[in-house]
Image (cartoon, grey):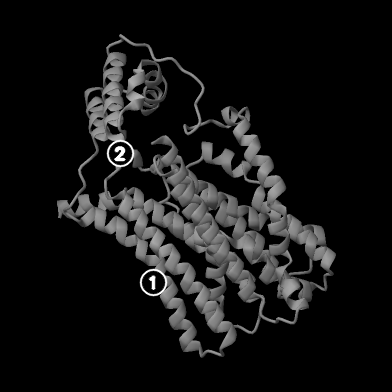
Amino acid sequence: MGCFTESLSSFFNNRWLVFVAAMWIQSCAGIGYLFGSISPTIKTSLNYNQRQVARLGVAKDLGDSVGFLAGGLSEILPLWGALLIGAVQNFVGYGWVWLVVTGRAPVLPLWAMCILIFVGTNGETYFNTAALVSCVQNFPKSRGPVVGILKGFAGLGGAILTQMYAVMNSPDHASLIFMVAVGPTMVAIALMFIIRPVGGHKQIRSSDGFSFSIVYSVCLILAAYLMGVMLVEDLVDLSETVVIIFTVGLLVLLLIPIAIPVALTFSSRWSRPSVEEALLSDSQKQDPGKSEDDSQDIIFSEVEDEKPKEVDLLPAHERQKRIAQLQTRLAQAAAEGAVRIKKRRPRRGEDFTMMEALIKADLWLMFFSLLLGSGSGLTVIDNLGQMSQSLGYDNTHVFVSMISIWNFLGRIGGGYFSEKIVRYNII
């Protein structure tokens, strides 16, 4: 019994479980991409013209982009608190929109509808922040793949929710708005206590590369499966039973990654820790009172000053071994008072506070790149429903789903290749 309890505790503190739960939350967080599917319903029910719908789209884009409040609150609240705030915003915002569209609540002026759309979509930023912050801290050496996969699932959320809506087989198109209000809220509340940092830097194993390969394979299969299902459902008049079978297959694909933390926890074949991990753990055992922040200062600041120049010319494995040995000696010297650790500004690739990030050129370069480069894509996504209807297509969901799928593949590929390029240049 004690062994089982220990295994269960290890399972819930496994960084791969947090990663898989974050993937599930992100798969419901792409509600902004569904605006092209719900905007025709809002336009018809409330007798809006295209200019008014465009204003709702602007409110949606602002809600999806204004994430500094979510980032600031994540610094002072636990991540489950941020997820709870996002779930409440999503439910209240889109739930009220659904009540107005279906006539269960009085019609509101346009500015009030914009506020509701803003509040509902802004809940997505809390989902993104909690998922990314926890997983980036748990996977410090695999940030590129982790961010790419999580943001990819956010883009795929439109296709996943559309398939769930197809199961309902409801003639009322406002049901999709109800699903947007309820679905992400339920998933976020169910998983909010799992999304948290669990000391992932201490769980680095040689099998991590294989685990990421499994996740990438599932991602590619999931994208191909959704693309095929959407095309078949659009071209062929399927029975409700077949649609349910397709949806069950989708859920099975989403559940496959949970096998990774299960296998790591309950399998007797644990990977041996790397040399660097072993040396660092020894130094922490010798000085258990030393904080993790101080250890990071040693790793990222003093090592660069004390490291011999010839270390950079060694092979990768030998270089990591020498650096780990140097980190251990510095940790021992600092504990004995022989070395005084100097505080300095973090370098690229290290953790920044909000104020430290605001004075870096990298932040503003990314900010203006996104500001100037993402407008065209958002314009197409916001008006996709009206564009497809103007061309004679009644079912706009298939086009929204296709954009979500290709968006998903682009983000996954961006995370994968960026990590490959960075590692290649370092080596």
**SS for callout 2:** helix
Q: Earlier in the sequence, mark 2 or mark 1?
A: 2
Q: Is residue 336 above or below residue 371?
A: above
Q: Is residue 246 left or right of residue 321?
A: right
* Amino acid under disc 2: Lys
**SS for callout 1:** helix
Identify the residue position indicated by label 1 in the image. Answer: 252
Residue 47 location in percent, x, y? 83, 73
Q: Is residue 184 left or right of residue 109?
A: left
Identify the residue position indicated by label 2 in the image. Answer: 202
Q: Is residue 167 above or below residue 10?
A: below
Residue 273 figure quarter: top left
Residue at the farthest top position: 338
Residue 241 location in percent, x, y? 46, 88
For the residue pair 412 and 60, the one nearer the viewer reads as 412
Residue 415 location in percent, x, y? 49, 50
Mark 1 neighbour class, 10 Å CA radius: few under 14, some 14 to 19, many 20 or more? few
- Give the position of the N terminus as an image quadrant: bottom left
